[in-house]
Amino acid sequence: MKARETAKNKAERLVIGLSGASGVAYGIRMLEACRELGIESHLVMTKPAEMTIGYETELSPRQVAAKADFSYAVGDIAAPIASGSFKTKGMIVAPCSVRTMSEIATGVTTNLLTRSADVMLKERRPLVLMVRETPLHLGHLRSMTALAEMGAIILPPVPAFYAEPRTLSDLVDQMVGRALDLFGYDWPDVKRWGEELAKGKRKPTSPSARSAPKGEVAVAGSRASEGRRGKK
């Protein structure tokens, strides 16, 4: 029994919500990334999200649900992810429609997706909202401000052209990887400035700095300085 409990505690869970905004590819790719990273995924989709899957992909909602470890009906408010006692690493809504964002901002939740997001806020867990809308009016901006003040992270799916994307998949992967960064996960498909991307790399200020023992500061000309101090 104890061994089973230990294994359960080690499994990290991430809640993934898909709402009806354009950009379901982000949520689908997030599910695939979780599988690659060994993260236990818990999926909830709204009815408009299921419609958008049909409009924007060649997959069915059932095929998307099969990519998750656990999938729940949007009306199942008794599902585990509706309770704060069910431990998770956090939640991302990708994409997040303005309707879903606004409902979360008010705290008046009507389905499992928005209830789960509300749980993240009350439990002080990371809640990332990939809001997909433009242009934005004042009401949208005020809702985002309210959510940010409550602890949510607003993450619009803005393309990172410095990563030199060549396909739409490249754009999606970069955004999904940056979202995973916010939960502390390192997904290999992300191109990082100053690392994989040579344009951002810089040479070390001093080669001796890397070879200096921990706790010591390498200072140029330090031996000469010591010699001068010894002669005085």
Image: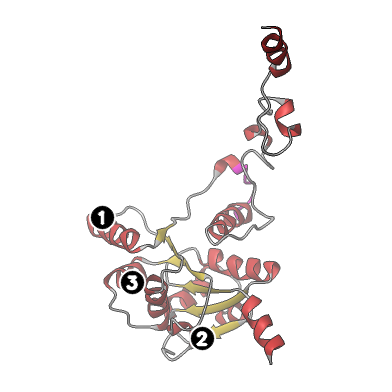
**Kind of element beneath mark 2:** strand
Q: 162 or 108, which lies in front?
A: 108
Label 1 belongs to which residue?
A: 137
> Which quadrant of the figure has residue 230?
top right
Amino acid type shown at disc 2: Tyr
Q: Residue at x 37, y 83 (%)?
A: 111
Seen in the picture, residue 5 relative to 206 is either above or below; the reply is below
- Tell whether position 164 is magenta: yes
How far apart, in angstroms, are the residues tagged by discs 1 and 2?
33 Å
> Mark 1 vs mark 2: which is more N-terminal?
2
Q: Is residue 14 visible?
A: yes
Q: Which residues are the magenta region?
A: 163-168
- Tell whether position 45 is magenta: no
> Mark 1 vs mark 3: which is more N-terminal?
3
Label 3 belongs to which residue?
A: 104
Task: Judge from the rendering whether residue 108 lies leftward or rightward of residue 80; answer left or right.
Answer: left
Amino acid type shown at disc 3: Ile
Q: In the orientation shown, which residue stands out farthest toward the left? A: 138
Seen in the picture, residue 47 relative to 21 is either above or below; the reply is below
The percent position of residue 11, horizontal first and vertical second, equals 64, 76
How far apart, in angstroms, are the residues tagged by discs 2 and 3?
19 Å
Label 2 belongs to which residue?
A: 72
